[in-house]
Image (cartoon, rainbow, N blue to C red):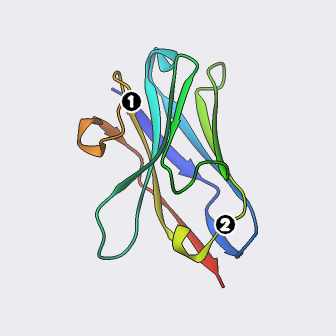
Amino acid sequence: QVQLVESGGGLVQAGGSLRLSCAASGRAFSRFAMGWFRQAPGKEREFVAVSRNGISLYADSVKGRFTITRDNAKNTVYLQMNSLKPEDTAVYYCAADLGLSRYYRDYDYWGQGTQVTVSS
């Protein structure tokens, strides 16, 4: 069992930056793929980034602006978001699964989400 708690969301102006954190409880954190997803009102949950075993994947919409990192000693994964745009506004979720996937239905464990709002 893995429990995930996100933090770091908030309100920021376009062009600004935020860093999200996701703290995981449970064992064998380093074995898990840790992903970030987001969901805007009325839209399906979408992939943002994922990291596992030194491999990081990004959605095209965030590539070059967002960076996913993880500290396995602290059981924490981060999402550094730079050059934010209004279209990045969404609830951001942290997720964990043993497989590396861009598809949200593949993930077994989810955090509660943190709101990110980017004003124009």
Quarter where residue 62 is shown: bottom right
User: Between residues 6 and 38, which one lies in front from this camera angle?
Assistant: 38
Tell me residue 43's x, y (percent).
31, 70
Vertical placement of 37 versus 89: above or below? above
Q: Residues within 10 Å of mark 2 (few under 14, many from 20)?
A: many
Quarter where residue 81 is shown: bottom right
Q: Which of the two discs, 2 and 1, labels the residue nearer the N terminus?
A: 1
Helix, strand or loop for disc 1: loop
Taking the spot 48% from the left edge, 29% from the top edge, the residue there is: 25
Q: Which residue is mark 1?
A: 2
Taking the spot 42% from the left edge, 47% from the top edge, the residue there is: 111
Name the residue type under label 2.
Leu
Residue 27 is tagged as none
Q: From the image, state whether disc 2 or disc 1 is nearer to you.
A: 2
Q: Is residue 12 left or right of residue 58?
A: right
Name the residue type under label 1.
Val
Q: Is residue 76 left or right of residue 93?
A: right
Q: Is residue 20 left or right of residue 114?
A: right
Helix, strand or loop for disc 2: loop
Q: Which residue is mark 2?
A: 84
Q: Residues within 10 Å of mark 1 (few under 14, many from 20)?
A: some
Q: Quadrant of the N terminus?
A: top left
Vertical placement of 56 versus 78: above or below? above
